[in-house]
Amino acid sequence: MSAKKTPKAEIEALREEIRRHDRSYYLLDNPTVSDAEYDRLVARLKALETAHPDLVAPDSPTQRVGGRASSTFRPVKHAVPMLSLDNAYEEADIRNWVERVRKNLPPGEPPVYVVEPKIDGLSCALTYEDGALARAATRGDGETGEDVTANARAIRSIPLKLDGKFPKRLELRGEVYMTFETFDAVNEEEKRAGREPFANPRNCAAGSLRQKDPSITKARDLRFTAHSYGVWEGINEPLSHMDFLERCSLFGLESNRRYAQTLSSADDIVSYYAQFKDKQLAQLQFAIDGLVIKVNSFAQQKRLGFTAKSPRWGIAFKYPAQQATSVVREIEYSVGRTGAITPVAKLEPVFCAGVTISSVTLHNFEEIARLGIRIGDRVLIERAGEVIPKVIKVVEKSKNGSLVRPPRECPGCGGPVVKEEGMVAYRCDNVSCPAQVRRTLEHFASRSAMDIVGLGDAAVDQLVSKRLVKDAADIYGLTKAQLMELELFADKKADNLLARIEASKAKGLDRVIFALGIRHVGEKTAETIAERMDIDSLLDAPVEALEAVPDVGPVVAKSIRDFFSSAKGRELIIRLRAHGLKMRKPERTIAAGAPFAGMTFVFTGELKRGTRAEAEELVKSLGGKASGSVSAKTSYVVAGEAAGSKLKKAQMLGVKILTEDKFQDMIKKQTDDNHSSRKQ
Ligand code: IVH
């Protein structure tokens, strides 16, 4: 019916329909449409408006921040306005600012400056009353934000209760953000579901925080890092910014403490900015858009005060986004795990922000239409902190550029390409499509899933092309002779891979659930489910039982149910089991009689004999728990070099402290004991 409508008519009809649903939902408390159907309508409207920007109207439901979700969040007036920082882009701006600061302070009191990252996230205020999280609000316009308490409670890095000695009332401020890894994973998922991927981690964090279903927020692994406070009542306020950051650590909160550095002159700030950009920026696991420089002493901050918009005691020293131009040579299509087909622009290689870029994902065909890209055009690309570069616009049209058309055939299997009603993505519907099978297997073998080292993209590619593997269970039937047939595997390599495949059988139920690649089921969700259900109950669990699991909302529950109801899903489990995969609960398998059962370890400072993740893995393998914060219940704090506040806290609480060597001795003793007892 809608096929004949003009875009204008369809847009108007959609707006009216969405408004009607909104009225029944909000005013009558009587939803007239499912969430999925509602989201589909909004997505369709957004897509049409993107394709026809002249038809966008200020009263369109898409123009209300975040659509329907935003009005479910009550407005909250901030006790103290949330201002913003002035920006500096050049050395001269910083030198002028330092000069102004010095002039406004008495001559005998030269300030100390704290320099820390400016995380590119979403500004939020958390109010703690008597140490308990009472409210979370977004910044909004600075005066009034939105109440996102329910969702903030789903963010694991936001403690529900503070540790240590906390103020009676505390309104903390900080950034809700997302690591690049999570951002990539969420976008993969969005694409698979045929939705528009997020442009950058900040948008993704914002979208994830402002969800109607807090279980989605929870599954997205958001982080919170504290950088300031609005209200502090009841106990003595910190004396300096550094002191504040230390206190945050004692409260059990993530803060900029890790990266904060004190400096004392404009020269130092300028060279630190350059050095941070060269040495540290690329290593960070999250996006920053500059550094923040603050006067450390709060007494001096008070003296300096505020202008109408921003504090005089602080400034943001921004890193410019890095851009370059290049020519689109061709468009390739990549097929994802669930068949979504993503157009990727192949570019003439160009150096930008420290890396050579030769391809850029264009997300979907509406994005191509929006940007008006044709093959042969010169485009402007940007790599702004995010790992994934993006196309900003066409800067030079090619004279005879060819139009980009959606593929008729799946590049993976040659099968037909379909576009679901109202969905943005084109997809291949063939569940045996080799491209989909490859992606599924790559995911299955990946580090955070079954961790089969040696079964990377190249090996999967060969195994699938030679038809040795069609699904995950086939991996466990591989023989040495089969592997030796492949170019990639000589004698020793084949043995190594077989050993890794064998070892993966003991990874446990949580890894298996994650490895299956069920839509919406990330690592954390898989872990939570595995802790609460065994594989048999999972195979038959009704949606209600799944929804009773803390991480799981209706969307996730349905997706799990669909997977285990499908013949393919059930059969896969049966075959994996027959191959000897242990599908036991993660905790219990180890905990029974394990040497570290019931013990909690916290690692702090720099470890010399391995990474912190490895040390934590060791603890877990012996049945213990690893935690990020020290409390009276902590069994041991392992202090590496330059250990800071966690060590102090452990001393304060009388928690046992181990050097790294002592810890390693303890591990060695346990593993030796284990060996000898097994031998007997
Ligand atoms: S201090 C008066 N420290 O950047 C505001 N802000 O315009 C004082 N931000 O939206 C804030 N990292 O949420 C401060 N280390 C940091 C920050 C930081 C990011 C955000 C902040 C605000 C914007 C400043």
Image (spheres, grey):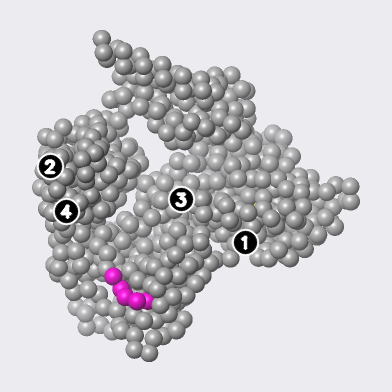
Residue type at mark 3?
A: Thr
The residue indicated by pointer 2 is: 481
Residue 150 visible in rendering? no
Q: Which mark is residue 179?
A: 3
Q: Residue at x 34, y 19 (%)?
A: 594
Instruction: State the image quarter where residue 377 is shown.
Output: bottom left
Q: Start and end of the magenta stretch?
A: 328-332
Which residue is at 42% across, 61% downward? 388
Mark whose residue sits in front, 2 or 1: 2
Residues tagged 3 and 1 counted as in contact (Cβ below 8 A) = no
Per the image, label 2 sits on a secondary structure element best described as: helix
Q: Main secondary structure of the magenta part?
A: strand
Residue lying at the far front in this picture: please name it: 491
The answer to the question of whether label 3 and label 2 lie on touching residues, with beta carbons closer than 8 A, is no
- Give the label, 3 or 4, closer to the camera: 4
Residue under label 1, please give it.
318
Query: Of callouts 4 and 1, which one flags the residue occurring earlier in the amino acid sequence?
Result: 1
Residue at mark 4: 464
